Structures are given as structure tokens and as C-alpha cells.
Image: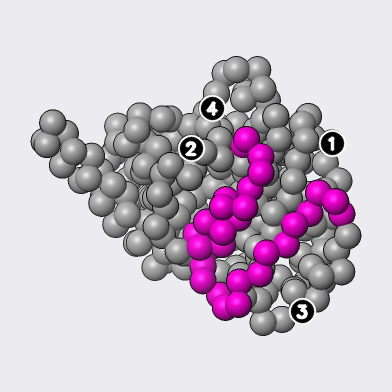
Amino acid sequence: MKLSILMPVYNEEERIADALKQALAVDYPCEIELVVVDDGSRDGTGEILGRADDARLRVITHPRNAGKGAAIKTAVASAEGEYMVILDADLEYDPQDIPRLLAPVLDGRATVVYGNRTFGSHSAYSFWYVMGNKGVTMAANVLFNSYIGDLETCFKLMPVELYRSLGIRSRGFGMEAEVTGKLLRRRIRPYEVPISYRARGREEGKKITWKDGVEAIWILGRERTRRRASLVRR
């Protein structure tokens, strides 16, 4: 099996070198490729990526910023692996956890695996950030009668062809809710494994806001309604 690690990047000149180093240093249980999409960065991110030298690394550049969902769409279109996982370049997630996500797939227990964050005083950006994350996750559980622990996690591992078949339209952070909503609509419930996490603050460049949480709930409602409509047509 080959794993495509997809990394969307936007204005991360202070972290991208470390993000690449950490991702490529992991002892993976399978072949990997790291597909980085520079989503229109306006700082020194592009220059740093241009100097990176590793046979497993491929860099794709968007001429202007299009959003995380758009960057992942570009990366997925270029992915050569059978499986994919998303890894942000902000160092909030530890790529050393990726083999733990792979384990249930490699031993036949799961097809889709999510990394479940446990928030604590050392890992949470703020009280309202955690409550917003829990609120969006609860909305998904209520709407789809499921029980997942962390919808907004970056670590979503699944077959590349499955992701392509979902037809994700959200160009920004709404892609997290859309992916999960469409999986749950197909009755695919992610297998979850605990992961480490360290949130950064606004002064460090954190980009997600409360507006993204509102959009996520709207997207989940849209996907749930679409399911009902398809059942009526049958």
C-alpha cells in the first residue's frame, strides 16, 4: 500500500521547514508520498518549498489563495497512493501519529480512520474553540444518529478513490464537515484513534474562526436534508 500525505500550506514560512522535516522523518509501515499544495502564499513559504529536496516530496502551487478545501482537491487529483491522509503544516498535529491511524487499515479493521483529539489545558486554543468543535461534532451526531468524537480533526485517513467519489465542493474549512456529512450519509462511520494535539493561537497564525463553525453546521444540515430527499425519490 502507498499512502499519500496531503499538506495544504498558506503563509507558513515560520513552520513549513519543520513541518516537512517532521512528516518525512516518520518510520511509516508503508510507502509514502508527501504532496504539498502552496495555496497562494504571499510570504517566504514558496522559496522554502523550492529548496526542499526529497524524492518523496512533490510541490504544487496555486497562483492565488483558494482555501483549504480547494488545496486538498488539487492534492487529491495528483495523489498516486491508494490511501490518503491530510496533514496541516501548522505543527498542531504530530505526524508520528499517522502510523497509528494506518494500523486499523493494515490489519483489516477499518477503511476510514479519524484521529480523535483530547483537549486539555495544554492543547486547547480557547474554551470557545473547544466548545465550538464539540458543538459541530454534536450536530453531526444528532443529524446522522452517529457517535463520532471529533469531526473537525485534520487527520482523516481513507482511500483516495473514496475521497474523490465524495465530490467535495467546499473550498474552505467547510470541507471538514462536508467530508464527514457525506461519509455518514453513506453510512460509513469513521474508526477513531486517539492522537496528540497542540493548538496554536491567533498570534501564531491560527486561521479558523466562529464563522467556519456556523458554516460547518449549515453544511451538515444540507447533507442530511439531501439524504432525506433521495429516500423520498426512491
Question: Is residue 91 shown to the viewer in this render?
Answer: no
Mark 1 or 2: the one toward you: 2
- Magenta segment boundaries in residue numbering: 54-83
* Residue corresponding to mark 3: 44
Q: CA distance from mark 2 to mark 3?
A: 34 Å
Q: Which badge, 1 or 4, comes first in the chain's sequence?
A: 1
Dot 1 falls on a residue whose secondary structure is loop
Is residue 88 shown in magenta? no
Q: Quadrant of the C terminus?
A: top left
Question: Is residue 1 shown to the viewer in this render?
Answer: yes
Q: Position of residue 218 (x, y in %)?
A: 29, 57
Q: Are marks 4 and 2 in contact (CB under 8 Å)?
A: yes
Q: Which mark is residue 162?
A: 2
* 10 Å crowding of disc 1: few (<14), some (14-19), many (20+): few
Q: CA distance from mark 3 to mark 1?
A: 29 Å
Under mark 3, the amino acid is Gly
Q: Is residue 121 above or below residue 71?
A: above
Dot 3 falls on a residue whose secondary structure is loop
Q: Which badge, 1 or 2, comes first in the chain's sequence?
A: 1
Question: Going by the picture, which residue comes out furthest to the top?
Answer: 108
Q: Which mark is residue 111?
A: 4
Dot 2 falls on a residue whose secondary structure is helix
Q: CA distance from mark 1 to mark 2?
A: 26 Å
Q: Which badge, 4 or 2, comes first in the chain's sequence?
A: 4
* 10 Å crowding of disc 3: few (<14), some (14-19), many (20+): few
* Residue corresponding to mark 1: 27
Give the left or right position of residue 140, taking residue 156 as reference. Answer: left
Q: CA distance from mark 4 to mark 2?
A: 10 Å
Q: Residue at x 48, y 37 (%)?
A: 162
